[in-house]
Image: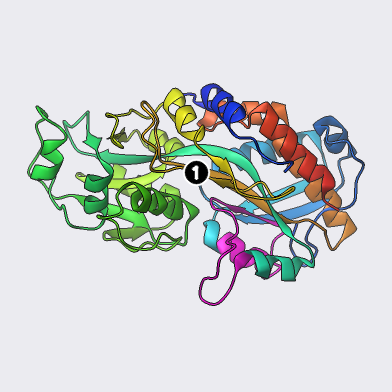
Amino acid sequence: MKIQRLGQVASVALMGSIALTACGSDNNTGTAAGDSSSSSSSAASDCPTGTLDAEGSSAQKNAIDEAIASFQEKCAGTTVNYNPTGSGAGIKQFLAGQVDFAGSDSALKTTPKDGKVEADEAAKYCGSPAWNLPMVTGPIAISYNVKGLDTLVLTPEVAANIFDGKITTWNDKAIAAVNPGVTLPAEPIKVFFRSDESGTTENFTKYLAAAAPKAWTAEPGKSWTGKGEGKEKSAGVASAVKATEGGITYAEWSYAKDNDLSIAQVDNGSGPVQLSGEAVGKAVAAAKPDGEGNDLRLKLDYATKEPGAYPILLVTYEIVCSKGKDAGKAALTKAFLTHFASAETQKSLEDIGYAPLPAEVQTKVETAIAALS
């Protein structure tokens, strides 16, 4: 696929600004004890045989598919299955012991929701802390399909009111006010949202709540609370917008590119910002470490007013038990995650619209993977 690269700039920004602390789960979740080396070549060359099953984030589907293909090519006798059902479903399957690890666009919750704390539930299931390992970074595009509308600027407030059903036509005066001189059609806005529980939804609503708190008052979460028509997964909402005149959605940049959708510029208060590698890098620079030890969760600043920063982005974590339950599954999980985190694999993700891990973060992820036992 033909996707603009963002990796190098985002990586440099992240490496220079995030001082992270150093930093498997089917019924046989986890990873086996291994040597202290985190070299991808040593782990991958061991090539334990068997099958892994994982589930979760659809945002990382193209990235993890790339990693799986190269891992299976190097390690005959291995099979890694990934089901992109959404972050919420992935975490549920992980907690139920149905998958070896989960992919999620938000880290396990450490605060109560519905009387439960995800991180505590995961630790109870694992019999050890569950770790959030950042593996894939990418921006969320507000993508749209309006004939003749090649350039569109949205402020957080305008975006919030569109996705909450308060602005319903493309020539609404609020849209016109931030797009002077642009001819806007008098046609309905058709919002599409993720109907499945989604980390992309959570990150997008975190952005709306942080950057436009008066316009978006709903609590951010994996389940959509705004208006519109639901479609499953990132591919579903992007395809729906492609097929619908007047459509708009939020989806990862790679899906917007795949479907040849227009992408809105975002103005957080310091002027319109076009989605680009440099712009994503400036926003990632505002991220703060939010975990302890080998738990590498990050806190993103969605309300940043850094000039030239594109503020709507997500990090996909692979969620694993820090201590596994079955030696065979553990060894295979460890080998695959080490391959996924390797410099070679991460570099390959640039070509399909993702930002590779910067060297400093990559080293910490490899250290965490090596510490799985």
Among all residues in the image, which is located at the extreme bottom? Answer: 115
Q: Residue at x 84, y 63 (%)?
A: 325
Q: Residue at x 42, y 57 (%)?
A: 232
Q: Residue at x 88, y 36 (%)?
A: 37
User: Would you say 196 lies left or right of 341 here?
Assistant: left
The answer to which of 338 and 164 lies nearer the viewer is 164
**Residue 171 in magenta?**
no
Check disc 1 and give the amino acid type. Answer: Leu
**Residue 104 in magenta?**
yes
User: Would you say 300 lies left or right of 339 here?
Assistant: left
The answer to which of 277 and 208 lies nearer the viewer is 208
Segment colored magenta: 89-118
Q: Residue 38: horizontal and vertical position, in percent?
A: 83, 36
Q: Residue 82: horizontal and vertical position, in percent?
A: 63, 51
Q: Kindly report the secondary structure that dominates the magenta region of the rendered protein.
A: loop
Q: Residue 70: horizontal and vertical position, in percent?
A: 71, 34
Element class at badge 1: loop
The answer to whether residue 70 is seen in the rendering is no
Q: Is residue 181 above or below residue 177?
A: above
Among all residues in the image, which is located at the extreme right? Answer: 35
User: Where does label 1 land, which residue?
Assistant: 300
Q: Residue at x 50, y 31 (%)?
A: 353
